[in-house]
Image (spheres, helix red, strand yellow):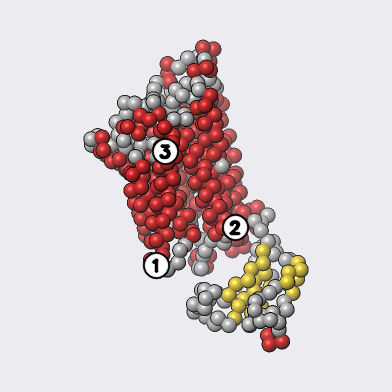
């Protein structure tokens, strides 16, 4: 949230660093570091959700996009988003190119911290946003084109969105849009941007969609809780000081994802009669997304309601990709676009003036319907429509334009898609592995199956392609004591020694 008119800030020679509380500065430095930690969280989440043969490529694309974003933000990203001398209301100018004249004056976001710190903190928001979006390449997108896309998208999409909501001269800011930590720039930007990129990229081949499931659910869980940890700094730091509003934002960032995770898990249970860890993680992320827009505006009881609503609506939002025929492999639209919409709309209804004033700075900002500010809901709705439509259209244009450039085709070859992006794009692999599993049609270790439960398949995949280099059907493989299966591994790449009983021979 932006505060004040930074055109009246003192010059660099007139600055007085003693005006900033060192506790506030330390808190925002820590919050920025926590937000940066969300990058590996995203990488692990996407890697775990993908097939094994493309697991490392997802880690690579998130990390590489982070570095490109840092370069763009340093050169002109911050200036285009927050330069106070631009008055068009749509995008900034180059007055702060290369962080020129960005040092010790009060920041455009709050008088509590210096502008240099503010620019760093806002950079982490940009990095997280593009990190979410690039998951749209899942298992079929090339690395180099998406890096070019990252630089252009940050310039033409993210910077305008940030300017609208947070620049003191942005049209959204002047109109009174309530967007605490990026419901528009971060969540709508990544959600609708990912949907548009996936649309241009095209669907994966049908055989790649058969029996698709995450290759490492433990990594999905690890990535989710790294994200949750980072989100506490992401949201809490948007109070721009160590104050009660920051604590309220952190509390809301605990309550909403907790309820959303429970609700999503129960919705999945009614279908499968299983408690899905992936479902729980998806729900928790949906709840966190909703808090991005609303954490610093709502009372805790409203966050509970928001968590329940986001868990339900985002769960059903996963059906949209089937209706549209767009291959959104990681449900970026359902979690981030739908969750961001929920958070922004909740601000129109439940935003509380008393919560906003807890930072001691924004003491005259009206809330939503709970404060009898009836116009706030349609302001939020119009902002959602503008941000969503602009993001989808411009993202699709950028992606299609890059795809038409020789050598920058967005999609890998059909052979590369079959072999896996780790092989054709990276040349390194997330892991070499030995896997023992039942026949394709066997669904449960408890004997609930469609096929012949007496047969198990051994897959040994340690070669570079991540493909099976040994496959045997083993019937009733047992030790001499007939109590358990065993595989003695001598060399993952070459030798697997089986010791069946005479009954199996």
Return the residue at label 2.
54
Asked if residue 458 is positioned above or below residue 419 in the image, the reply reads below
- Circle 1: element type: helix
Q: Secondary structure at mark 3?
A: helix
- 212 relative to 346 in the view: left or right: right
How far apart, in angstroms, are the residues tagged by discs 3 and 2? 36 Å
Q: Position of residue 447 (x, y in %)?
A: 52, 78
Q: Position of residue 316 (x, y in %)?
A: 36, 58
Q: Which residue is mark 3?
A: 249
Q: Relative to 415, say whether 443 is above or below.
A: below
Q: Nearer the viewer, mark 1 or mark 3?
A: 3
Q: Residue at x 44, y 22 (%)?
A: 111
* Tag of residue 271: 1
Task: Tell whether label 2 touches label 3 (CB within 8 Å).
Answer: no
Could you say where residue 287 lies in the image, as x and y percent from the top left? 41, 49
Give the position of the C terminus as an image quadrant: bottom right
Q: Is residue 347 left or right of residue 458?
A: left
Residue 147: image location, x then y, percent: 57, 44
């Amino acid at each position: 949230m932006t505060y004040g008119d930074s055109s009246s800030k003192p010059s660099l020679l007139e600055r007085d660093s003693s005006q900033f509380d060192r506790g506030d500065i330390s808190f925002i430095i820590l919050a920025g570091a926590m937000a940066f930690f969300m990058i590996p969280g995203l990488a692990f989440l996407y890697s775990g959700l993908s097939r094994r043969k493309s697991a490392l490529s997802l880690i690579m694309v998130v990390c590489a996009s982070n570095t490109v974003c840092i370069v763009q933000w340093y050169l002109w990203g911050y200036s285009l988003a927050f330069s106070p001398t631009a008055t068009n209301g749509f995008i900034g100018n180059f007055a702060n190119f290369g962080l020129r004249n960005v040092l010790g004056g009060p920041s455009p976001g709050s008088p509590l911290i210096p502008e240099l710190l503010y620019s760093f903190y806002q950079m982490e928001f940009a990095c997280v946003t593009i990190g979410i979006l690039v998951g749209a390449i899942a298992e079929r997108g090339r690395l180099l084109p998406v890096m070019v896309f990252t630089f252009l998208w940050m310039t033409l999409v993210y910077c305008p969105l940030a300017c609208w909501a947070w620049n003191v001269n942005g049209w959204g800011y002047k109109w009174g849009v309530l967007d605490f930590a990026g419901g528009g720039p971060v969540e709508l930007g990544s959600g609708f941007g990912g949907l548009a990129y996936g649309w241009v990229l095209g669907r994966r081949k049908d055989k790649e969609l058969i029996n698709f499931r995450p290759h490492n659910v433990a990594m999905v869980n690890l990535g989710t809780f790294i994200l949750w940890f980072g989100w506490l700094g992401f949201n809490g730091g948007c109070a721009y000081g160590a104050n009660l509003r920051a604590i309220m934002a952190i509390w809301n960032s605990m309550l909403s994802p907790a309820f959303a995770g429970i609700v999503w898990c129960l919705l999945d249970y009614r279908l499968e009669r299983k408690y899905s860890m992936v479902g729980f993680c998806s729900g928790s992320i949906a709840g966190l997304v909703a808090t991005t827009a609303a954490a610093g505006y709502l009372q805790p009881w409203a966050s509970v309601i928001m968590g329940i609503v986001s868990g339900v609506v985002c769960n059903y939002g996963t059906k949209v990709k089937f209706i549209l025929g767009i291959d959104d492999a990681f449900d970026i639209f359902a979690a981030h676009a739908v969750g961001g919409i929920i958070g922004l709309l909740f601000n129109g209804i439940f935003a509380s003036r008393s919560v906003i004033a807890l930072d001691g700075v924004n003491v005259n900002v009206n809330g939503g319907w709970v404060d009898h500010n009836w116009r706030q809901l349609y302001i939020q709705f119009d902002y959602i429509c503008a941000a969503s439509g602009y993001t989808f259209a411009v993202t699709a244009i950028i992606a299609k334009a890059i795809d038409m450039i020789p050598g920058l085709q967005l999609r890998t070859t059909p052979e590369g898609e079959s072999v896996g992006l780790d092989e054709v794009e990276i040349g390194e692999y997330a892991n070499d592995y030995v896997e023992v599993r039942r026949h394709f049609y066997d669904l449960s270790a408890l004997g609930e199956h469609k096929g012949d439960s007496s047969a198990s398949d051994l897959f040994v995949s340690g070669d570079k392609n991540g493909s099976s280099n040994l496959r045997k059907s083993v019937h009733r493989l047992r030790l001499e004591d007939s109590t358990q299966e065993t595989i003695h591994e001598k060399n993952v790449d070459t030798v697997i020694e089986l010791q069946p009983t005479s009954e199996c021979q």
